Image (cartoon, rainbow, N blue to C red):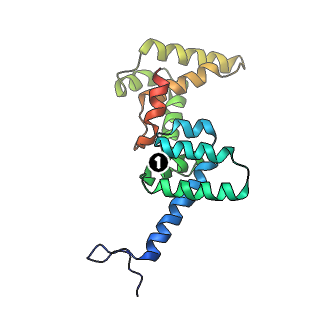
């Protein structure tokens, strides 16, 4: 029997199904390495989340192995794409996320360098509060001049981050954003 991934009939070989299940179990293995807080921020199904948290509680080798297999089984009912995207971002491997962060940093540097860039930013992102932007830029410059901790500098970055949405943000963060709004 040849190992066809998909025929015209929609047939998937047993070997391919096993490879797919192993890949999902490997993805589950990556998830168990995350902290409890990170797992809770992800919009995972309740049964998968509780299985991942249970894995962290176990200490016996056999129980850990069985729990990992159970997690792999639960992963079959979940779309793995958003989870993979989230893990790539956590590992710093997402080129799209890195490009977005660099864009935020460039805007912050432009705003810090010259007051003439503030109207440009406000024109590009009209939802921004001009008074808050001006105040944070002024405070950031003063902090830098006085060699103080960069509190306003970080706040400026957060303000820019709120105005420029991350492209292609996976829906797995929806839960995280709802918590931030509260």
- The residue closer to the viewer here, 6 or 155, is 6
> Residue 155 vs residue 5: left or right?
right
- Placement of 159 over or under 17, stated as above or below: above
- The residue closer to the viewer here, 24 or 133, is 24
**Residue 109 x %, y %:** 54, 30
**Residue 132 x %, y %:** 48, 14
Outermost residue to the left: 8
Q: Is residue 128 at least partly visible in the picture?
A: yes
- Placement of 129 over or under 10, stated as above or below: above
Q: Residue at x 55, y 60 (%)?
A: 25
Q: Residue at x 68, y 43 (%)?
A: 57
- Placement of 149 over or under 67, stated as above or below: above
Q: Quadrant of residue 143?
A: top right
| Quadrant location, the N terminus | bottom left
> Residue 146 vs residue 101: left or right?
right
Q: Quadrant of residue 61?
A: bottom right
Q: Residues within 10 Å of mark 1 (few under 14, many from 20)?
A: some
Q: Is residue 98 at least partly visible in the picture?
A: no
Q: Residue at x 49, y 26 (%)?
A: 179
- The local secondary structure at tag 1 comes to helix
Query: In this figure, which residue is indicated by the disc labeled 1?
Result: 96
């Amino acid at each position: 029997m040849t190992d066809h991934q998909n025929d015209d009939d929609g047939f998937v070989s047993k070997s391919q199904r096993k490879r797919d299940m192993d890949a999902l179990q490997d993805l589950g293995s990556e998830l168990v390495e995350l902290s409890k807080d990170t797992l809770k921020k992800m919009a995972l199904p309740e049964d998968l989340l509780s299985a991942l948290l249970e894995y962290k509680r176990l200490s016996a080798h056999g129980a850990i192995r069985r729990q990992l297999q159970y997690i792999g089984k639960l992963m079959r009912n979940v779309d793995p794409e958003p989870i993979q995207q989230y893990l790539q971002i956590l590992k710093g491997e997402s080129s799209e996320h890195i490009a977005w962060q660099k864009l935020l940093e460039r805007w912050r540097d432009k705003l810090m360098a010259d007051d003439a860039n503030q109207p440009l930013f406000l024109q590009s992102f009209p939802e921004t509060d001009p008074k808050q932007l001006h105040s944070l830029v002024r405070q950031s410059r003063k902090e830098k001049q006085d060699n103080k901790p960069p509190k306003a500098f970080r706040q400026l970055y957060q303000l820019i981050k709120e105005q420029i949405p991350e492209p292609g943000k996976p829906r797995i963060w929806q839960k995280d954003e709802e918590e931030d709004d509260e």
